[in-house]
Image (cartoon, rainbow, N blue to C red):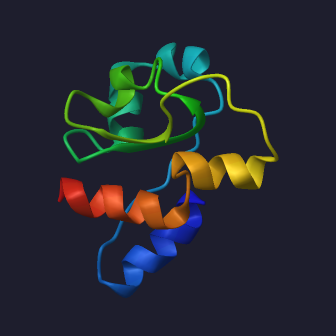
Amino acid sequence: MALQAQAELAKEKIHVRVVSMPCMELFAQQDEKYQQETLGGDLPKVAVEAGVRFGWDRWIGPKGGFVGMDSFGASAPYQKLYEHFGITAEKVAETVKGLI
């Protein structure tokens, strides 16, 4: 999804970096220089998570964007949940544009 959004944004000459963070705990153990180089320092950041925002603010900062769930308790096939919560490539691209 993030890569799909990246491709769509590139068509508009908006170049973004996609970083996969499968384990926040391991990333937190890396030195700060590595973290900053990986995440782009002061660049705007958007987290995409098929879950809740909890924990992401540390990495995206107070002005960062988030695409994911904002509540618990929904149950359905993931495609329906993604649509319900707006977890789509289009929403990721829209969120990026809102930060630049």
**Horizontal arrangement in the rendering, residue 1 relative to residue 43 (left or right):** right
**Residue in the picture at 20% in, 35% down:** 63
Q: Determine whether 29 is above or below 89 in the image.
A: above
Residue 41 appears left or right of 84: left
Relative to 16, is 41 on the left or the right? left
Q: Which residue lies furthest to the bottom in this view?
A: 11
The quadrant of the picture occupied by the C terminus is bottom left
Q: Nearer the viewer, residue 99 or 16?
A: 99
Q: Residue at x 46, y 78 (%)?
A: 8
Residue 93, x across and y down, in percent: 39, 65
Position of 25 with respect to 55 (left or right) is: right
Closer-to-camera residue (92/58): 92
Above or below, 46 relative to 91? above
Q: Nearer the viewer, residue 73 or 82?
A: 73
Residue at image point 47% right, 68% down: 6
Q: Quadrant of residue 37?
A: top left
Residue pictured at 60% horizontal, 18% vertical:
26
* Vertical comparison of 80 with 75: above or below: below
Residue 75's x, y, as percent?
76, 34
The N terminus: image quadrant: bottom right
Q: How many labels does the image show?
A: 0
Q: Where is residue 66 in the image (x, y as percent from the top left)?
A: 39, 40
Q: Is residue 4 above or below residue 70?
A: below
